[in-house]
Image (cartoon, coloured by chain):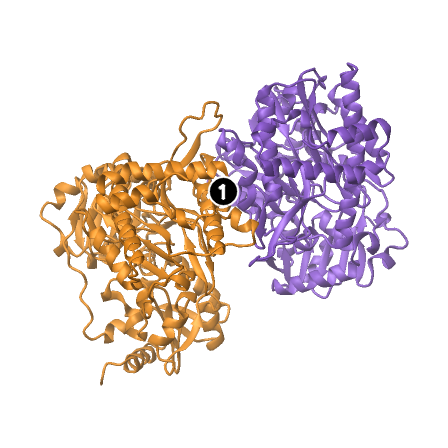
Chain colours: A purple, B orange
Amino acid sequence: MSDTIASRLAAVRGEMASVGIQAFIVPRADEYLGEYVPAHNERLHWISGFTGSAGGVIVLEKSAAIFTDGRYTVQVRQQVSDKLFEFESLTDTPLADYLAHHLVAGDKVGIDARLHHMAWFEATKHTLAKSGIDLIALKQNPIDQHWRNRPALPSTPIMLYSAAQSGQSSLHKRQQIGAEITKAGAELALITALDSLAWLLNIRGRDVPHLPVVMGTGLLWANGTMRFFTDMSKLPQSIDAQVGEGVSFYPEEDLAEMFSELKGQKLLADPHTANAALLLAAGHAGAELIPGMDPVLMPKACKNEVELDGMRNCHVRDGAAVCRFLAWLDREVATGNLYDEGELADKLARFREQDGHYIEPSFDTISAAGANAAMCHYNHLNGKAAKLTMDSMYLVDSGGQYLDGTTDVTRTIAIGDVGAEQKKMVTLVLKGHIALDMAKFPKGTTGPQLDAFARQYLWQYGFDYDHGTGHGVGHFLSVHEGPQRIAKNANSVPLLPGMILSNEPGYYRTDGFGIRLENLVEVRACEALADAEREMLEFNAITLIPFDLRLLDKSLMTRDEIDWLNRYHKRVYQAVSPLLHEHDLAWLKHATRAI
Amino acid sequence: MSDTIASRLAAVRGEMASVGIQAFIVPRADEYLGEYVPAHNERLHWISGFTGSAGGVIVLEKSAAIFTDGRYTVQVRQQVSDKLFEFESLTDTPLADYLAHHLVAGDKVGIDARLHHMAWFEATKHTLAKSGIDLIALKQNPIDQHWRNRPALPSTPIMLYSAAQSGQSSLHKRQQIGAEITKAGAELALITALDSLAWLLNIRGRDVPHLPVVMGTGLLWANGTMRFFTDMSKLPQSIDAQVGEGVSFYPEEDLAEMFSELKGQKLLADPHTANAALLLAAGHAGAELIPGMDPVLMPKACKNEVELDGMRNCHVRDGAAVCRFLAWLDREVATGNLYDEGELADKLARFREQDGHYIEPSFDTISAAGANAAMCHYNHLNGKAAKLTMDSMYLVDSGGQYLDGTTDVTRTIAIGDVGAEQKKMVTLVLKGHIALDMAKFPKGTTGPQLDAFARQYLWQYGFDYDHGTGHGVGHFLSVHEGPQRIAKNANSVPLLPGMILSNEPGYYRTDGFGIRLENLVEVRACEALADAEREMLEFNAITLIPFDLRLLDKSLMTRDEIDWLNRYHKRVYQAVSPLLHEHDLAWLKHATRAI
């Protein structure tokens, strides 16, 4: 039998029949439930041909459907056969609704419980039960049983990350978090998020694209001792000395056996980050599950001084790389060379790669010319890369993983002359960016309380943007980390000193143009407030790259906003100019001139 | 036996022993769980002597404790015997913690389940169970068994409120909300909030101070038919014609019997507004409880055009009354007559009473001179009323119940000359008030997203205030109504056209002075936004009373803010001047002059 999508669906349906299920769900996730997935775990791609970063498939006995969001409406139809799949919207049609509509009472839906959060599993099981449908965890994933020539798991050795690089020994981190486990009323915690594990053990890896982590699962006891279940072949000789006392390593397959020792023990686990298979197994083994937030999240989010210094330092070098790119781009456009989005993204990567501490992009670069930028998650690899055109705007959202930190920046750039309407919109977005940057706020304030600062000027004219304003960023870890967030949606996590967030308002004119202006900022104690009655916090931008002055309508800006911009550009010049020369230095001087 | 607090405690302890409980909780609430309680139901006062508006008592076998918040720290010690009660803080010591600390496993805590929300009952039962303590609903309230000379229940007849006054017939309202009951998956709803019942039946009453409602309980079926359980002696002859078809009236005591007919029926009930006794009884009777928000809340919050017109109209007359008061106050201060807080509150009430549609104050007036205003819920009746002093500020927060609407306004007034620091703080508060008033925001925006607009200028200097920025207001109903709210705390209710909210930032300098600047605003569709891409909303102030120009530091205000103030004052003058004469008119002209 040839290995086609049709034959794969047939093989999966054969397994479905043999275990007696009428539907099988394939999410775009692996057992670590992170944002990125190694090729070994790209099951959604195997079953459908779809390469997007979000989506899911439901295989029924006689049909199948693929669910994607608005970003992939075009791409999914190019990559996936409409003879084999119906196309559904993830946002308009919840999976459970689709299943309830296509199945009857008594039917069974199978999942690989490793690929779903426990919280999702419980909610979906509850919803389907209302229609008399059962959701069951399969013993084996039908895809894994039939995947020929499956890509190997990554085998890069673990990279040791010293206390000098991370600012704190693993032992100290584990003891500190152990105390939090006791406070939560538990005896030990299941740690499953890969960035939590990497931070806790002071290790990094290359197992997942864009995210420098090591695949594995951890159990952390309240006294700080830990067992890490991973591919033992990746362990370097010096690992024990690095992680300090109290850590033992086991093959991943030993985890199930370990659970049997947890009978009657109070196990803290995060149902929003841990997969259902692990928590079901722990429950069956007799552990008393205490649901609660991953205790690593808050200490990891509040960077220590070494982590903050690393973040600040890599942003100076990242700023220089992006400035070289922008200076080069201006020169090329001036001589009439209009590149395409792919060439531009590659060129930007080349500039970053000149840095000795650079590892890889922190996410897929969004390189969007003209109207393509109106799609806020545009990816030029999903179709034919467009060329720049004169008298338009170019949006580039990119970042790097460096040994000392993680960057993420978006700039919107003038290609030739742009019209007054575009300049007005860029200025409104920048005014929001500045308002958020200049905010001072009492300790205890959460992101959603500040989100509207960034939207207020767009709102005054009847505009808005449909994404969050700010996400957390890790230290040489995930470019999207929680638990804090600046967005419309409720989030009860207070902003605290040492947290890094993005400040990225935007505006998207359908079929016209797109704007996003993004800096990373650190949260710090307010400097110099003479009569303050409250403990106040503020943001401080760590991204050091000019905003394009050619796109601003100064008449819409207040004196305070102009002063902010001039102060920021002065900081950019002072920090980045020592790393630039000749053409590039001249470009920076001009780009950061006071207005 | 004489009727003293000690003898009352002894009598209650006797009942506790006879039913075998070790603790009894007395909240400041009656079975309707509203903000105000008629004298008949002031059980907290009976058991302790305390007259404050928030608090609770726990009677143990050998001791008792009274719980109050920061507003009543002084008053509770004046009114309550420290020989009989320990003093505890409601905020620092949750009742359940106190009970867990003072009782042992196996003990029982009794409550009158009518006096607690179902949600509170379930949460507290769950918490106490962790310590092996049981929370039980008593068959009889020990206080009611021993209350001699108990004040009678109010017996004022029901006031009929026509469709011309309310803008919608009761039948239409009931049919509309019946559809919501079906949507919630229920067959009928238990309606317990007194303002919900009054709004639904187009009736008003005088059963509760400040809140023009009728005591009773309702059951509303999905087809719009309703049973109202109340004191039948209050029903006017014409009630049937007024409420329209489908409403039948029963004595309150018939409700229990009615529940027995609900076996197997799906009953929508709000565990945050309905008392535990009702929901326990419905559950025992076999009704299937569907927890959900009181379906009257949203339609009641979004006022119709008649309600809005009533609100606007009463604010013009209320504005004239308050302006007369403020003009009189300025004249008296100018001639050296400095009144005390009680005299001022009474004088203000006299001005409101001149209006033919005025019924009563919508809450206890906060009349606070000088440093007393630093207590944001100050009540001059809780101690000795202070006299105004020269060169200070006076804060007055008051409102009226009118036949066509409800008002609530706070102004801070200069008494003589005040210093630069006070003016700076008043100006920062006003800048926040203006920023919130000028906000435009897309449909779907919630109060917490806008709250920081009102705080941002205080935050810039390290200041804040510890109360919400805005509460909903009813139409000739509760001056504090939900479900919308502008505050730091999460609230997922979107602001919608027709909602009325307060806009009341403040600032409180301990032992120094207090500032609050409060208007009521309506939410409405944005006028004249030419290129708007979103459905935008905005606020429009309906309170029409000048802000004291003598307290502003114009140098801290932007041109937009000054323009806003001048526009607002022009509106105030145009609306209110036709109702004022001579001295008062001249005062208004001066008070609303452009700056």
Q: Front-most of A577 and A213?
A: A577
Q: Front-most of B403 and A97?
A: B403
Left or right, A105 with reference to B182: right
Q: Front-most of A470 and B173?
A: A470
Q: Relative to A355, say whether A326 is above or below.
A: above
Q: Position of residue A538 (x, y in %)?
A: 63, 49
Which quadrant would residue A335 be assigned to in this image? Answer: top right
Which quadrant would residue A365 be assigned to in this image? Answer: top right
Instruction: State the residue lying farthest toward the bottom.
Output: B1
Q: Chain of mark 1?
A: B
The reply to whether residue A268 is visible in this rendering is yes
Number of marks = 1
Quadrant holding the N terminus of chain A:
top right
Secondary structure of the residue carrying tag 1 is loop
Q: Position of residue A450 (x, y in %)?
A: 55, 44
Which quadrant would residue B275 be assigned to in this image? Answer: bottom left
